[in-house]
Image: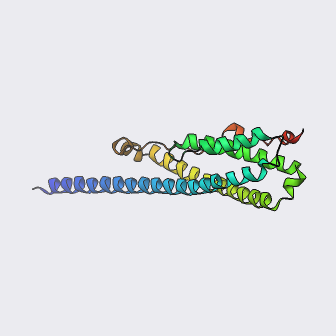
Amino acid sequence: MTPLGLAAGFAVGLLAIVVLFIALATYNAVVALQQRIDKAWANIDVALKQRWDLLPNLVEAVRDLMTWERELVTEVTRLRAAYSPAAPVAEQAATSDATSSAVRNVFAVIEAYPSLRSDRNVLELQSEIERLENLIADRRELYNDQVYRHNTRIGQFPAVILAPLFGWRPRAFFAAQPAATARPDATLAEG
């Protein structure tokens, strides 16, 4: 083999090794991001389940004392029943946001009832649910950050070339619905 042929063979071999290294590094990076998304979602799911487990206690604690807001208590109960951990992220996000909104409305109404504001059980449940709401918000932010990183990564070169080969698709954000960002309606307590 001539020196020129040897150099060309070496260059082709080196190029193949570099391409293989880049492909492996990209694959590993995307898989790591997918694992982070799955872990972040599992953390959200744990907090959601804890909130769902506390809601019946809150409903029971305020049911007899909130004579004017039966439909509000019923809505919280309906939303808890609508939760499905097997549902797609977008559906779970919508249910979670609707529940957060309903819970905020319950808390606004609690403030209007002196007997509820002084009930220790209600206050403890309210405090724990507020803690979980904040935890869910923090975990949702982490989840969305990981989804953003994943979606950006698979949209960039060289992952954009590998994405169809490995079935990588953009993941859904855990996005707040417009209604979930509205302020609670404290006028429900009038009556």
Quarter of the image for the C terminus: give it.
top right
Give the mark count: 0
Measured as percent of width and height from the top left, residue 133 is found at 69, 54
Image side of residue 49 versus residue 158, left or right: right
Foreground pick, 161 / 132: 132
Foreground pick, 113 / 47: 113
Is residue 176 visible in this depiction of the protein? Answer: no
- Residue sitting farthest toward the left: 1
Q: Residue at x 66, y 58 (%)?
A: 135
Q: Quadrant of residue 17?
A: bottom left
Image side of residue 36 versus residue 79, left or right: left
Q: Residue at x 62, y 42 (%)?
A: 95
Q: Quadrant of residue 96?
A: top right
Q: Residue at x 72, y 43 (%)?
A: 101
Measured as percent of width and height from the top left, residue 80 is found at 63, 45
Measured as percent of width and height from the top left, residue 155 is found at 46, 43
Instruction: Please say if 12 is above or below 171.
Output: below
Q: Quadrant of residue 2?
A: bottom left
Foreground pick, 68 / 104: 68
Is residue 184 visible in this depiction of the protein? Answer: yes
Image side of residue 57 versus residue 142, left or right: right
- Residue sitting farthest toward the front: 64
Image side of residue 136 versus residue 116, left or right: left
Q: Residue at x 62, y 40 (%)?
A: 94
